Amino acid sequence: MKTLYTWCAILVIVFASVVGDVLLAHAMRQVGDVGALWRRSGLVAVIRRTLGNPNFLFGVMAMAVAFFSLLFALSWGDVSLVAPAAASLTFIGNAVAAKIFLHERVDRRRWIAAGLVAGGVALLAG
Amino acid sequence: MNFRKYLVLAGVTVFAAAGDSMLSHGMKQVGGVSVHHLQGVIFAVANPWIAIGILLLLAFFATYMTALSWADLTYVLPATSLGYVLLALVARFLLHEHVSPMRWLGIALITGGVGFIAGGPALTEHPAMEGGGLTGQNVSFGDSAQSGILTKDASHATHTHSGAEL
């Protein structure tokens, strides 16, 4: 039963993380190079511009969902299962989402790698 | 400047792994959270381990956002792959959790797969790890940054480079 809970929590983490990551990556692309902006206009400008981005706020909300799911998952399962499983599945989800929504280039090599990662996750579960 | 960006990627790796470990340790002390008593999660924050874990994850978030501002999502994410190895070591030696050989193999596969994605030719010289063996990626970062080209150009340079490498 705990295993089922753990994997359900992991799935919620993965979905929320992918949504959050895509929104945050999109937001930070809109904000631009934080280091350059900091040198030019100061830290306050960086914070204001980041917090004022709607994509950032929605991304943070999705990440909050992922975070609380992580708390649940960690109370039910080992950190060496939960963290790598959630993170690697999130990675595959992100590769798909980055290709579709962020228009990043994901070629055959990256899909093979995604398969390797998925195999690793299966081993972690066993 | 280059060094700073690799420091940021290293920060992403270490803060994530350390934060997760602190949370795990704290939640084991607090005990299992029941679905029927969700407020238990809120009170869990009172546990010092969980509080420290949250602070570390905030640091992770800051470095992660910084990295995303000048790099692709699919470039930043592989930088966290070393965190899985770090997590396994922390789980085994600090939290004394049992990590079976199959799990070690799984962690190795995941790390290998993620490293594979990280950029083929640069597979053995992980950006967050080896400052010396740096290739084209940081050159494109550094050039655009040093010549003062602003954000969009910098991210564009990164993008075209990773595209060219594939």
Image (tube, rainbow, N blue to C red):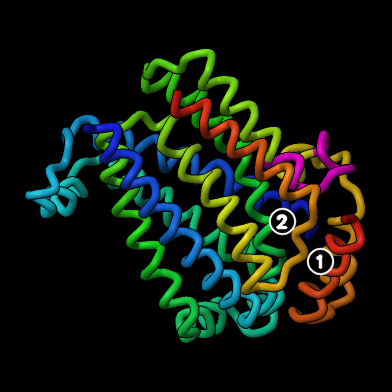
Residue A1 position, x and y percent, is 22, 32
| Residues tagged 1 and 2 counted as in contact (Cβ below 8 A) | yes
Marks 1/2: CA–CA distance: 9 Å
Label 1 residue SS: helix
Query: Which three-letter amino acid code belongs to the residue tagged 2?
Result: Tyr
Whether B117 is among the magenta residues is yes
Q: Which residue does the numbered mark 1 point to in the structure image?
A: B158
* Residue at left offset 76%, top offset 45%: B127
* Residue at left offset 65%, top offset 34%: B111
Residue A102 position, x and y percent, is 66, 73
* Residue at left offset 72%, top offset 49%: A111
User: Is the residue B46 above or below the residue A79 in the image?
Assistant: below
User: What span is colored magenta in the figure?
Assistant: B114-125
Whether labels 1 and 2 belong to a single chain: the reply is yes
| Number of marks present in the image shown | 2
Q: Quadrant of residue B137?
A: bottom right
Q: Quadrant of the N terminus of chain B?
A: bottom right
Judging depth in this view, the residue of A41 and A48 nearest the camera is A48
